[in-house]
Amino acid sequence: MNKRVMVITGTRKGIGRYLSEYYLEKGFIVIGCSRSESDLTHENYEHFCLDVADEKAVKKMISSISKKYGKIDYLINNAGIASMNHSLLTPLSVVEKIFKTNVFGTFLFCREVAKIMSKNKFGRIINFSTIGVPFRLEGEAIYTASKAAIEMLTKILAKEFSNMNITVNAVAPTPAETDLIKNVPSNKIQNLLNRQAIKRFSKYGDILNVIEFFINQKSEMISGQIIYLGGIS
Amino acid sequence: MNKKMIAKEICKIVNDYFESQDMDIIAEENTVLFGSESVLDSMGLVNVIVDIESRFLDENYEISLTSEKAMSRRNSPFRTISTLADFIEEQIAANEESDE
């Protein structure tokens, strides 16, 4: 199997869809997933309908990929949900939902995919954080806390997986014009953009650029890093 | 799959691991995998567990060696190849029962 195999979560729309189309164009085999069906059709694309926090379903998906393709080269943990609300107005059910998708989902995919990557002694894992973490954004306590958990997971898994030649990094975009922020008032978003060194929305291409750097063959010394877009540190 | 077959499969996997690490040891049923007398270091044990899970999955036996049940037992199922074979046999039997 010479073709490179990439797993991307949350591929039905937004950044996940964009990344799927980009890497399919580059000749990769892309396996995506989302809770509902995808209308993306391509001979090298396969879609799984699942909840990323469903352990059984994730295990089944990864083992079937392993059987079919014999390897997984890259994992992009893009699936994520947000809820922008004051903590005093946030029900526990929302907290659970956000942590399940963002943290448990990312963990499950890292764990199951790393088992396959370890056999080939090669792998690149990319997680998604947010600039909300360094900004410690009020009104986003739970979403940001879940992303802070992902950052720490990224840094520790980088150590645990290093002897298998698997790197684990994260990209942390500024707000991008996706469904994730569609319900946030525009003045809130503008205030946030004003706090950035580079005061604009992230474009999909900005995120792709960081992913390209992480998955580059020459990036084998890059692991446990969180790259913030927009000039934030 | 009975205990003898399971133990034989585990021995094969552990021997493959020893070979990959240039370790001059041959695994047998009483080979110690976990604890102070273990022939494996902690990462070695992780690698072997992952290999066992995936090798059994290839044969369509879905086992999970990292369950809470395994971790909380008074006597670790990972102690020797023989105890691990007992634990896997139990899991396969439980899975077959729940499928019925």
Image: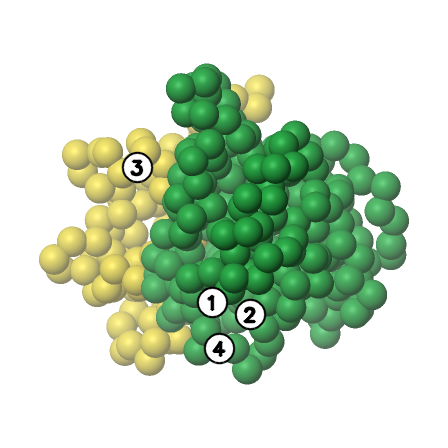
Whether labels 2 and 1 share one chain: yes
Labels 2 and 4: the sequence-earlier one: 2
Compared to residue A40, the image places residue A208 above or below, namely below
Q: Name the residue under label 4.
A: A220
**Chain at numbered mark 1:** A
Q: Name the residue under label 2.
A: A214
Q: Name the residue under label 1.
A: A167
Same chain for mark 2 and mark 4? The answer is yes
**Chain rendered green:** A
User: Is tag 1's residue or tag 4's residue first in the polypeptide sequence?
Assistant: 1
Q: Which residue is drawn at 80% across and 40% down?
A: A38
For the residues labelled 4 and 3, the Cα–Cα distance comes to 35 Å
Q: Which chain carries label 2?
A: A
Residue occupied by mark 3: B70
Mark 1 vs mark 3: give the one in front: 1
Quadrant in which residue B31 is drawn: bottom left
Q: Which amino acid does label 3 sit on?
A: Ala
Q: In which quarter of the image is the C terminus of chain A?
A: bottom left
Look at the numbered discs 2 and 3 and tell me whether their residues touch, using CB distance below 8 Å: no
Chain letter for yellow, please: B
